[in-house]
Amino acid sequence: MKLARYTLDHRTAIGAVLDDRIVPLAALDPAAPATIREVLAAGPALIQRLGEALARRQHPGIALADVKLEAPIPDAQKYMAIGMNYHDHAEEAARAGIAVPKNQLWFNKQVSCITGPFDPIFKPRVSEKMDYEAEMGVVIGKRCRYVSEADAPSVVGGYFVCNDVTARDWQFKSPTYTLGKSFDSHGPIGPWITTADEIADPHALQMTLWVNGEQRQSASTGGMIYNIWQQIHELSQVMTLEPGDLIATGTCANVGIALDKFLQPGDVVKVAIDGLGHIENRVLAEPASA
């Protein structure tokens, strides 16, 4: 099931996407939770029940073209991201003289950076090196701690497309990367959450990024150094993972800093992943009032 958060006539709700339409979850089940995070936390039984109701097509739905898709989970408690987690990206970093970590390299994107799948992303007036990073996102669906790699699939609620937008000049000012990864609007996610039951193998999806129609990045998610289950195992040794927590699983080669092609106002960045849809964001100059 594809769970989306959308706005229509100044009202925001959640629904299930079917082809080119979205069906309000309340039409499928009047007792359905009001947020996607709560739907995921309720577990597979609810998702199956909603899916069965959707398949009966008893509601005509609303044309996707008539709604504004919002960030599916705008209020995550955590947004964790792993660095240099694709073999080809680690190789390009090494060629640039950047040390490749010997362990999983984690940083957090402050949740205030989260924005919608088609919202603008702003070039900060204090950065000259705004970069893109196509990534597959994972959302946790079950509260967990000390998760084994074997059990990690059972705590995944779903997957989404994300762009780990990065201000490189700020990223390297601090060894934690947090400042360079957390500018307002630098966390576009969506276009919806594709529940885990729909994705047979999250490590076999094609991921592609374009800037102004020019392909910049393309790789299979099988190119990860540490797979999703290893990532969840590692994080859960340290912290309790909660439903709605977001994980960005790494980017592939040909980021802007490697090509010396940084984002500028007017650019349009599109990220697509097989089975998960796409997000597309126009770069705007940060307003003077920001």
Image (tube, rainbow, N blue to C red):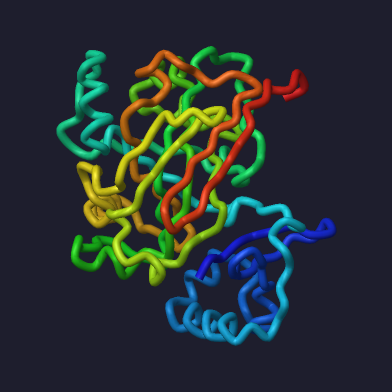
Horizontal side of 233 relative to 53 (left or right) equals left
Q: Residue at x 71, y 73 (%)?
A: 61
Q: Residue at x 49, y 78 (%)?
A: 47
Asked if residue 181 is positioned above or below residue 8 in the image, the reply reads: above
Total numbered labels placed on residues in the image: 0
Q: How far from the left and from the top, in percent, is residue 167?
A: 49, 22
Q: Nearer the viewer, residue 245 or 137?
A: 137
Q: Residue at x 27, y 50 (%)?
A: 231
Residue farthest toward the left in the current orientation of the protein: 102
Q: Quadrant of residue 44?
A: bottom left
Asked if residue 73 is positioned above or below residue 33 in the image, the reply reads: above
Is residue 154 visible in the rendered image? The answer is yes
Asked if residue 28 is positioned above or below residue 39 in the image, the reply reads: below
Image quadrant where one finds the C terminus: top right
Q: How far from the left and from the top, in percent, is residue 223?
A: 24, 43
Is residue 112 visible in the rendered image? The answer is no
Horizontal side of 155 relative to 53 (left or right) equals left
Q: Nearer the viewer, residue 15 or 244?
A: 15
Q: Residue at x 39, y 27 (%)?
A: 177
Q: How far from the left and from the top, in percent, is residue 164?
A: 46, 36
Horizontal side of 45 relative to 285 (left or right) equals left
Q: How far from the left and from the top, in percent, is residue 220?
A: 30, 45
Horizontal side of 197 relative to 129 (left or right) equals left
